[in-house]
Amino acid sequence: KPPKRHWSTVSHRIAASASASPPTMKVFDWKRRNADESAINDAENFVFTLDNLRPAPGSRHRKKRKGRGIAAGQGATCGFGMRGQKSRSGRPTRAGFEGGQQPLYRRLPKFVGKPMGPGHTKTVYNLIKL
């Protein structure tokens, strides 16, 4: 039976062995993990065109599929919790509602005047045959 070691010495040994390996850039998209991107990483000789533009690995995420069971991670309440106004069906509050504070459209004065009223002239164009 090996002797018991203190947890701090074990963690230092794990950290030392992890730092000895060279840092690698992990590609998060599983479809592109085996893709050869050596040409793209050569910035001096590579020309970007519209047909070879693609997002950086790990910058794009799939949308969460909510309400598909508890195993999917966002099932049942879909991340809205059990109670409260935001967990109910329908829109939680009306558009422009600021939680009881006077909304912006009521704080500002009314927009008075029409763009075609006095002081504005309308340009009249003649019809031409093409």
Image (spheres, rainbow, N blue to C red):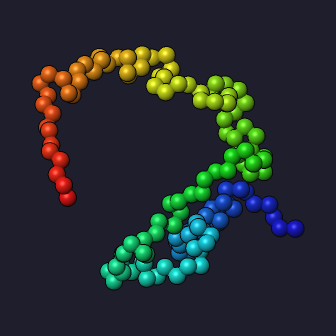
Q: On screen, 85 above or below 40?
A: above
How many numbered marks does the figure carry? 0
Percent coordinates x, y for residue 73 in the rendering: 72, 48
Q: Nearer the viewer, residue 79 or 127?
A: 127
Q: Quadrant of residue 53?
A: bottom left
Most distant residue in the front direction: 129
**Left or right for 75, reference 124:** right
Between 129 and 125, the one nearer to me in the picture: 129
Front residue of 24/53: it is 53
Residue 123: give x, y in percent of width and height: 14, 37
Question: Horizontal and vertical percent for residue 89?
Answer: 67, 30
Give the quadrant of the C terminus.
bottom left
- Please name the residue shown 25% across and 19% down the image: 112
Q: Residue at x 16, y 51 (%)?
A: 128
Whether residue 20 is visible, yes or no, is: no
Considering every residue shown, the one lying at the far right of the view is: 1
Left/right of residue 53 with respect to residue 72 in the rendered view: left
Q: Is residue 105 visible?
A: yes
The image shows residue 95 at horizontal and vertical percentages of: 49, 27
Residue 101: quadrant of the picture: top left
Q: Residue at x 64, y 51 (%)?
A: 64
Q: Quadrant of the N terminus?
A: bottom right
Vertical placement of residue 56 versus 98, above or below: below
Image height of 28 relative to 108, above or below: below
Residue 33 found in image quarter: bottom right
The answer to whether residue 37 is left or right of residue 125 is: right
Foreground of the two, 8 or 61: 61
What residue lies at 56% left-to-right and 69% top-to-bottom? 27
